[in-house]
Image (cartoon, rainbow, N blue to C red):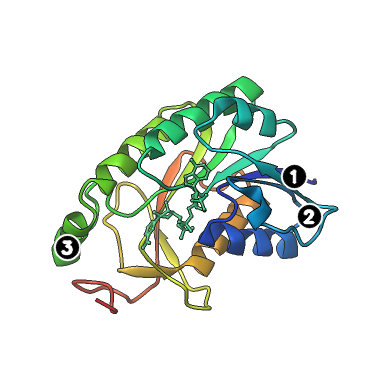
Amino acid sequence: MMRHVLVLGANGQIARLAEKQMLADSDVHLTLFLRRSSRLKPEDLSREKVVDGDAADRNALTEAMNGTDIVYANLAGQNIEDQAKAVVASMKKAGVNRLIWISTLGIYDEVPGNFGKWNNQQLDGYLDRYGAAAKVVENAGLDETIIRPAWLTNKDEIDYETTQKNETFKGTEVSRKSVAAYVTSLVKDPAKDVHKSVGINKPNTDGDKPAWY
Ligand SMILES: NC(=O)c1ccc[n+]([C@@H]2O[C@H](COP(=O)([O-])OP(=O)(O)OC[C@H]3O[C@@H](n4cnc5c(N)ncnc54)[C@H](OP(=O)(O)O)[C@@H]3O)[C@@H](O)[C@H]2O)c1
């Protein structure tokens, strides 16, 4: 079955990798939603459409939802909670249920030990904003999957394991390409990990800090 995915923040670093993987590994059609949309040139016009918009703009979102089966939100920013509210409201209005939402490690204080302490110090403020946004997504009554990546790298590798919400977080790092691969696996099997908040890390990267710090 051909699915239609709406990518919010489509010029984001993970999003661009996921777009490539989704087009290569599945027959999905993509609507690429981003600010200043001239930055993105679709490679396959028969399967990709570019839409200009801000993810805090409910009207722009609702319009872009038309025909969408799955929303993949790869967003960021100080107003991330407002963006979450706008995305949820627009999905409800349009009758779209499946949401993949990129968040971060640490929103439940689930990162153990010295790395957890360091992470809390580094991400002070940001964790509260991202936690509030994740709460909006979890309480929306949608078919959501929240993804909590470890510290991101640009390594050209797909190598990851996952943890669930009630488990302590593992590892310190993960490649953006791995997060994109996990997103792609959800798009290919939308029933997978519904109502889950999933930590994602590279195996055997435990430490007090990411290796490059
Ligand atoms: N760095 C880490 O180690 C780490 C670890 C865990 C999680 N994360 C989080 O993972 C997420 C994805 O990572 P990434 O590397 O793909 O990030 P990224 O490249 O910064 O992508 C985020 C995208 O969000 C877009 N955006 C922000 N506000 C928007 C708005 N109001 N409307 C539309 N688009 C908006 C940005 O678009 P513009 O280009 O228009 O600004 C940007 O393309 C981020 O939220 C990041 O904070 C990061």
Report helix, strand or loop for mark 1.
loop
Image-quadrant location for residue 78 = top left
For disc 2, does the CB lie below 8 Å from ligand 1?
no
Q: Nearer the viewer, residue 7 or 164?
A: 7
Q: Report whether residue 182 is seen.
A: no
Q: Amino acid at mark 3?
A: Trp
- Is 168 left or right of 49, judged from the image as shown? left
Percent across and percent down for residue 11 are 58, 55
Label 2 or label 3, whichever comes before in sequence order: 2
Report helix, strand or loop for mark 3.
helix
Label 3 or label 1, whichever comes before in sequence order: 1
- Is 24 left or right of 116, judged from the image as shown? right
Residue picked out by circle 3: 118
Q: Amino acid at mark 2?
A: Asp
- Is 12 left or right of 40, judged from the image as shown? left
- Label 1 close to label 2 by CB (< 8 Å): yes
The crowding category of the residue bearing disc 2, from other C-alpha atoms within 10 Å (few below 14, some 14 to 19, many at least 20), is: some
The crowding category of the residue bearing disc 1, from other C-alpha atoms within 10 Å (few below 14, some 14 to 19, many at least 20), is: some
Residue picked out by circle 2: 27
Residue picked out by circle 1: 3
Q: Nearer the viewer, residue 87 or 33?
A: 33
Which is more foreground, mark 2 or mark 3? Answer: 3
Quadrant where the C terminus is found in the figure: bottom left
Percent across and percent down for residue 144 are 50, 38
